[in-house]
Amino acid sequence: MSAQIIYGDQLAQSLREDMKQEVKKLKNKGVVPKLVVILIGDDPASKSYVSGKQKAADFIGIDSELITLPSSTSETELLKLINDLNHSKGVNGILVQLPLPEHINEQHIIEAINPDKDVDGFHPISIGRLLTNQDTFLPCTPLGILTMLKSKNIEIAGKHVVVVGRSNIVGKPVGQLLLNEHATVTYCHSKTKDMSLYTKTADILIVAVGQAGFITSEHIKEGATVIDVGVNRIEDGSLTGDVNFEQVKEKAAYLTPVPKGVGPMTITMLMKNTIKAAIAQTK
Ligand code: GUN
């Protein structure tokens, strides 16, 4: 058996077409969704993510402003900027690209963003709402993963979801999101002993560890759905996931590729959250 590949880029493109129509209608009502992205320093990966966000916003018709600041920017200066944007009526969504330079406390910054404009879904209020299953801005990668699973009608309720990785951005929230969808959720991480004991029982395996080829066919059950969140640059300069694609595709029922998998969906969900913010703030 060879897995059906879930192409996130194709799904993302079709969702962006839908959003373009939605934004057109909003504009007719005088609502122009606006996202402000703050990029500090010149990390090449961050620059590339941010340019992907700008491109998606342009396509959909979302007004997006990029504020680039030098890595010498102080925490106080950044907090002041966020405070201004919190109070700026035309700004619906605020995203501060992570990671931040070491002298800036990431948590201080995340907590300074008005939860009504928290399109990343990283604010403790957003996370608390996710935990208690209330309407909120869902973190973009977890929401992208859920959307990919639903696009293939993959059953979640009652299934065993194993999440490998426990980051605040992906691992932890994706487990919570799928728990809300009635999955049985197990988290594995760097201190887990005999990881394959757990991964082998996963109906849906979500991997976000940042190690090229970490998951092999030995780790998975025949017929599993495998979602690869990893983006690793290898020696030849190409991008590869956390899953050994060639091995796992012979055993899994569904598998996401890298690139063209989860990545484009993450950006698309950011646009979805920005439109949601604009609508909520217009009411
Ligand atoms: N850095 C890597 N992924 C993300 C993300 O989803 N949001 C932000 N703000 N920074 C990131």
Image (tube, rainbow, N blue to C red):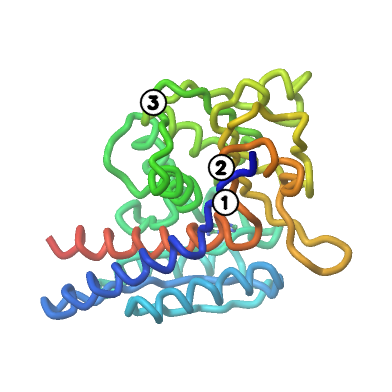
Q: Are marks 1 and 2 in contact (CB under 8 Å)?
A: yes
Judged by depth in the image, the label closer to the viewer, 3 or 2, is 2
Seen from the viewer's position, the closer of residues 134 and 4 is: 4
Quadrant (top left/top right/bottom left/bottom right) for the N terminus: top right
Q: Which mark is residue 254?
A: 2
Viewer can see residue 96: yes
Q: Where is residue 231 in the image (x, y as percent from the top left)?
A: 69, 56
- Disc nearer the start of the sequence (1/2): 1
Disc 3 secondary structure class: loop
Q: Residues within 10 Å of mark 2 (few under 14, many from 20)?
A: many
Disc 1 secondary structure class: strand
Q: Where is residue 275 in the image (x, y as percent from the top left)?
A: 28, 64
Q: In which quarter of the image is ligand 1?
A: bottom right
Q: How crowded is mark 1: few (under 14 residues within 10 Å), some or many (20 or more)?
A: some
Q: Which amino acid does label 2 sit on?
A: Tyr
Residue 40 drawn above or below residue 183: below
Q: Which residue is drawn at 50% across and 78% down?
A: 67
Q: Quadrant of residue 190?
A: top right
The residue tagged 1 is 5
Quadrant (top left/top right/bottom left/bottom right) for the C terminus: bottom left
Q: Which mark is residue 157?
A: 3
Q: How crowded is mark 3: few (under 14 residues within 10 Å), some or many (20 or more)?
A: some
Q: Quadrant of residue 235?
A: bottom right
Q: Do the residues labelled 1 and 3 touch (CB within 8 Å)?
A: no
Seen from the viewer's position, the closer of residues 263 and 271 is: 263
Measured in 3D between alpha carbons, the distance from the residue under mark 1 to the one under mark 2, in whole angstroms, is 6 Å
Q: Using residue 134 as the reference point, say whether residue 64 is left or right of it.
A: right
